[in-house]
Amino acid sequence: MARPPRAQSPLIPEIRPTFRRERAAIKRGVWPVAGCDEAGRGPLAGPVVAAAVVLDPKRVPRGLDDSKKLDPQTREKLHAKICASAEVAVAIAPPWRIDRDNILRASLWALARAVACLPVRPQLVFVDGRDRIDAACDCQAVISGDAILASIAAASIVAKVTRDRLMTRLGLLYPGYGFENHKGYSVPEHFAALARLGPTIHHRRSFAPVAAAYGDIVTADMAGGEIEPGALPL
């Protein structure tokens, strides 16, 4: 006897970030409320870029989401809207800090610095992930926060767009590495460039593929290729 057809699972609506938790804090008298996130933990080259954003409750841009879910054109459009309507600050942890402190500590340092560089002083900070940061206010870590909170989603977009622009700039300064394409991530094109040209000063020596490439290779360095650490203009 034929088996009855399986019952179809009900469609699960896609979860989008909302401003609910930020608005709840405002109703309790807690304001400003910032969201912060970073981009660039995994790549072999380039900095970690952190962003902190205080959204205007009356001007929350539509379409905010985890930056990884958005295409580059959408990220750029949202980046412009966020910067035009919110308080925003960006900071970087350069490769030398990542190598010295490790990637987690360097990321948390950049997040804390971005919050400290905001033009307003937040009373509450939501940070993406499991770890709280050293902030001069209440700080709450939110796992998958960029998919839940609008302010963290906004910060993830600002961080991603800023880092992508920096890596495109490095691509012009270091032709042949393909930074403008892969943004420093572990892809065949990048491995081939490392083998052919050697690491640059923007590669993370503490990351195994880069450490292996150092062997007998002299670090590639070009005049004007350094990006200063610290806060960055948008």
Image: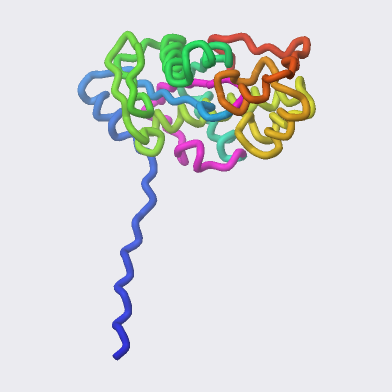
Q: Position of residue 221 (x, y in %)?
A: 75, 14
Judge from the rendering whether residue 25 lies leftward or rightward of residue 108; answer left or right. left
Tell me where the magenta segment starts and ends, as one range. 44-72
Asked if residue 128 is positioned above or below residue 63 in the image, the reply reads above
The rendered magenta stretch, by its main secondary structure, is classed as loop
Any part of residue 118 in sight: no
Q: Position of residue 181 (x, y in %)?
A: 69, 35
* Quadrant of the rendering where the C terminus is positioned: top right
Q: Position of residue 31 (x, y in %)?
A: 30, 18
Query: Hey, which quadrant is residue 220 in on the image?
Result: top right
**How many marks can you see?**
0
Query: Hey, which quadrant is residue 174 in on the image?
Result: top right
Q: Tell me the residue at 55%/19% (across/down).
A: 206
The residue at the far bottom in this view is: 1
How is the protein colored in the picture?
rainbow
Any part of residue 73 in sight: yes
Judge from the rendering whether residue 188 lies leftward or rightward of residue 110; answer left or right. right
Residue nearest the observer in this picture, 227 or 17: 227
The residue at the far left in this view is: 28
Q: Tell me the residue at 31%/64% (across/down).
A: 10
Asked if residue 13 is positioned above or below residue 48 in the image, the reply reads below
* Quadrant of the rendering where the N terminus is positioned: bottom left
Q: Decide whether residue 85 is among the magenta residues.
A: no
Q: Tell me the residue at 59%/34% (across/down).
A: 76
Q: Position of residue 136 (x, y in %)?
A: 32, 8
Residue nearest the observer in this picture, 79 or 105: 105
Q: Decide whether residue 69 is among the magenta residues.
A: yes
The residue at the far front in this view is: 216
